[in-house]
Image (spheres, rainbow, N blue to C red):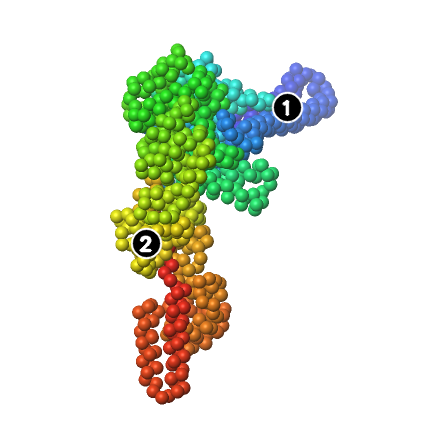
């Protein structure tokens, strides 16, 4: 207690009164006795004062001891309470980690036996500011996002400490994002700090569909009470633990799935409650997720709205790499180089297949669909031939299974919803449109809807599909379309397959609009009538027939054999059949692109002679024959089958550039084809296993990469002699010396084989051009004629002349033009 307070002054005053008061009072009342017995009175006074002194000292000591005991007891009690609270905090974090450790795959038809760790396969989503009314509910964007588009991470936004509304399409990764945030904050530590997560935050993750009944039933319920009611843990919370965390501003409160609240009135009540909690606990961070339609009509008062961005191509590749590695590690129960190698091979294979299928690659920008694709590829091996099965699974998950897995009420079955949408898709295909006004769309499905659900309203059905699954979208007011044309084409193919309408598609083989629908039909049915129609067409559709044959579930063997004979690229090059066969072969190779150095999609072989002949027949290809082709080959109209595999060599660079443009106009898929760049050529050369003599034309250089000059250096270094005369380094060096490429000193140095390549490169030498070789011949002949009768000189020069002539012929034969065309696809 502070000095100078009344309580502190009272103690000494009472002590003085006890010391002086009683003796004075006793002396006054017993004065006569004091005068009669002074000695006894003094002795009694001394004893009294001693007693008072002892009592005073004892009292002071007890007071101090009492204070010390009180402080110790208080400290012990406080420590016990703090330890109890701290232990609960650790328990709560462990509970969150256990609940959110694995990737949530509920609702997917095809999944593996083992759960995958979320933190291993998670790819951080990009978030971009966007008004809610501009955000789309469509499962996929109309165009894939650029890697450079404006994006923020969730951690950057959380550090701003403002309420957030995260909106995104079905399967866009909103729930997974919140589970990832919960996991990172619950674990804390260096890994959390390394990615920029806020420190010492208590994560709170609430599923709105589960807590909404409590909120609607009691709008005044507090946030701590809602949190307590949501926990499924056996350990009780210390009194007001969550209240204290919220009062201290230590929480990140995440509320997932506003759109999953069933009615508009309930959704409004939940939003009002959330607004009140934000006002009551302003020092905490609040995050709410929703599909756009669920947020537009009931936005939070003060939230920053951000939209989940689709995966970029780089994010798709990153997800597949981590997903396969985690999947193989779990299934094998080990981690080693073999597992890592197989994971790379599998992810590269799927990525290559996706790059070869633009429709699937677009869909893969949606994290849920990408996860489905990865599962189907790993456990069914269904890509690309089983695209129909993949689209079937995607449709089922989007229409019903995802909602069922979340415990949401689903009033129509998958088959009922799909049969109605099939009718709409077929109507849009026959009208050859990608959009329909709402009234026309409702009219298209009214009959089918009446058969499967008599009490359902067509307009309400369309709205429910748009808002609930994202398979339909409203690109402009009153106009509806499928989220991706692939969904329209797939559902139309199912409609035709269920009705056995192969003959209908056989009449559409010349209509490009029906091409993809027909291919999807082929993956589900017997495609024999359609392939027959392709063969019998006035202008045979052999390329399309080959595609259908590759993807067909069934095809008559006799038709398959007939088609194989027609596709042999041999015979008269002026016929439509030959052109169709070569085009089909080129399309097949384009569908089998290989990935080089992770990112480069390259056709699997150099352009063939047959494909280049096809280019020569086009308006842009006339008179672009390789210079070394003799006249009879330039005019030849018969070709053998070997030309389909033989690479075209020795064309000019501009001819190669024009061929790339030609290929882009001929091949399907909307891809761009180009020559490689110089920095890519080495990797492509090695990736395709091309021989040392083959050079590659590049789009950013007028000189080919590799080829003759690189091959000569390699031969001199003893690496590869394929295509060169059988000789030794020294013999070859003598020819170079004879041609004047190197002098005598250099020739002497070339006798050291390990130094050959290094020294030749250091000399900056090259083989002489044909013109230079001709000049050397003339010089040697003149020297020979001027030697006169000097036999020794004459003999030496004659030898040089002979060697020059012989080796020029041999080297020229070995060094025929070897520039090839390899195409990169973008």
Q: Residue at x 45, y 25 (%)?
A: 396
Asked whether the beta carbons under mark 1 and mark 2 sit within 8 Å of each other, the answer is no
- State which quarter of the image contains the N terminus: top right
The first of marks 1 and 2 along the sequence is 1
Q: Which residue is mark 2?
A: 636
* Residue density around tag 2, few if under 14, some if 14–19, many if 20 or more, within 10 Å: few
* Residue density around tag 1, few if under 14, some if 14–19, many if 20 or more, within 10 Å: some
The percent position of residue 300, horizontal first and vertical second, equals: 37, 23
The percent position of residue 527, horizontal first and vertical second, equals: 42, 31
Classify 108 as above or below 682. above
Is 593 or 247 nearer to us in this picture? 593
**Which residue is the extreme one toward the top?**
455
Report whether residue 371 is seen: no
> Which mark is in front, 1 or 2?
2
Is 821 or 620 nearer to us in this picture? 620
Q: Which residue is mark 1?
A: 19
The image quarter in which residue 765 lies: bottom left
Instruction: Name the side, left or right, on which 129 lies relative to 9.
Output: left
The image quarter in which residue 168 lies: top left
**Which residue is the extreme one toward the left?**
619
CA gap between label 1 and label 2 equals 139 Å
**Which residue is the extreme one toward the bottom?**
789
């Amino acid at each position: 207690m502070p000095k100078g307070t009344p309580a502190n002054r009272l103690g000494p005053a009472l002590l003085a009164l006890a010391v002086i008061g009683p003796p004075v009072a006793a002396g006054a009342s017993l004065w006569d006795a004091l005068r009669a017995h002074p000695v006894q009175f003094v002795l009694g006074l001394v004893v009294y004062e001693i007693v008072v002194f002892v009592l005073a000292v004892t009292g002071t000591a007890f007071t101090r001891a009492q204070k010390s005991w009180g402080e110790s007891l208080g400290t012990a009690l406080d420590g016990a309470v703090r330890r109890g609270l701290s232990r609960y905090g650790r328990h709560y974090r462990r509970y969150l980690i256990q609940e959110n450790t694995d990737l949530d795959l509920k609702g997917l038809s095809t999944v593996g036996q083992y759960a995958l760790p979320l933190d291993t396969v998670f790819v951080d989503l990009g978030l971009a500011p966007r008004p809610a009314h501009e955000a789309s509910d469509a499962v996929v964007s109309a165009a894939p996002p650029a890697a450079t588009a404006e994006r923020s991470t969730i951690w950057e936004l959380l550090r701003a400490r403002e309420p957030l509304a995260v909106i995104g399409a079905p399967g866009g990764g909103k729930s997974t994002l919140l589970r990832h945030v919960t996991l990172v904050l619950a674990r804390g530590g260096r890994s959390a700090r390394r990615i920029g997560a806020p420190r010492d935050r208590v994560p709170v993750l609430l599923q709105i569909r589960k807590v909404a009944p409590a909120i609607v039933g009691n709008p005044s319920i507090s946030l701590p009470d809602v949190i307590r009611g949501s926990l499924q843990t056996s350990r009780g919370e210390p009194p007001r633990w969550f209240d204290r965390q919220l009062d201290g501003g230590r929480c990140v409160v995440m509320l997932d799935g506003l759109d999953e609240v069933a009615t508009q009135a309930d959704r409004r009540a939940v939003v009002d409650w959330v607004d009140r909690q934000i006002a009551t606990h302003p020092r905490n961070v609040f995050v709410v997720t929703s599909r756009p339609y669920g947020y537009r009509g009931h936005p939070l008062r003060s939230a920053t709205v951000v939209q989940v961005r689709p995966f970029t191509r780089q994010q798709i590749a990153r997800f597949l790499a981590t997903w396969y590695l985690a999947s193989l590690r779990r299934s094998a129960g080990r981690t080693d180089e073999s597992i890592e190698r197989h994971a790379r091979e599998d992810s590269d294979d799927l990525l290559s297949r996706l790059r070869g299928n633009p429709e699937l690659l677009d869909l893969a920008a949606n994290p849920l669909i990408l996860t489905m694709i990865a599962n189907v590829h790993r456990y069914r091996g269904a890509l690309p031939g089983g695209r129909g099965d993949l689209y079937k699974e995607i449709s089922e998950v989007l229409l019903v299974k995802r909602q069922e897995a979340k415990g949401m009420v689903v009033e129509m079955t998958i088959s009922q919803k799909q049969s109605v949408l099939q009718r709409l898709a077929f109507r849009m295909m026959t009208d050859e449109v990608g959009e329909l006004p709402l009234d026309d769309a409702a009219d298209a499905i009214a009959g089918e809807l009446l058969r499967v659900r008599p009490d359902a309203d067509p307009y309400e059905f369309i709205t429910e599909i748009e808002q609930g699954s994202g398979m339909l979208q409203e690109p402009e007011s009153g106009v509806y379309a499928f989220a991706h044309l692939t969904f329209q084409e797939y559902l139309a193919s199912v409609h035709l397959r269920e009705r056995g309408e192969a003959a209908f598609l056989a009449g559409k083989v010349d209509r490009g609009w029906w091409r993809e629908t027909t291919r999807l039909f082929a993956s589900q049915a017997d495609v024999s009538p359609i392939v027959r129609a392709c063969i019998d067409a006035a202008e045979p559709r052999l390329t399309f027939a080959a595609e259908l044959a590759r993807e067909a579930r069934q095809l008559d063997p006799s038709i398959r054999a007939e088609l194989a004979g027609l596709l042999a690229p041999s015979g008269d090059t002026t016929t439509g059949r030959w052109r169709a066969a070569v085009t089909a072969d080129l399309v097949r190779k384009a569908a089998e692109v290989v990935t080089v150095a992770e990112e480069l999609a390259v056709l699997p072989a150099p352009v063939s002679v047959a494909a280049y002949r096809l280019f020569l027949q086009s308006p842009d290809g006339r008179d672009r024959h390789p210079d070394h082709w003799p006249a009879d080959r330039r005019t030849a109209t018969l070709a053998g089958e070997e030309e389909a595999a033989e690479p075209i060599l020795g064309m000019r660079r501009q001819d190669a550039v024009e061929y790339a443009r030609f290929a882009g106009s001929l091949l399907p898929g909307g891809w761009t084809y180009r020559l490689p760049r110089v920095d890519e050529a080495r990797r492509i050369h090695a990736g395709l296993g091309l021989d040392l003599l083959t050079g590659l034309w590049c789009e950013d250089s007028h000189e080919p990469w590799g080829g003759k000059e690189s091959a000569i250096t390699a031969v001199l270094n003893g690496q590869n002699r394929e295509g060169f005369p059988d000789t030794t380094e020294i013999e070859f060096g003598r020819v170079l010396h004879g041609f004047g490429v190197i002098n005598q000193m250099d020739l002497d140095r070339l006798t050291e084989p390990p130094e050959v390549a290094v020294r030749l490169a250091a000399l900056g030498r090259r083989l002489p051009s044909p013109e230079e070789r001709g000049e050397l011949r003339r010089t040697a002949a003149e020297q020979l004629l001027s030697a006169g009768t000097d036999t020794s000189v004459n003999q030496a020069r004659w030898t040089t002349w002979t060697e020059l002539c012989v080796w020029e012929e041999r080297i020229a034969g070995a060094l025929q033009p070897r520039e090839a065309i390899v195409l990169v696809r973008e």
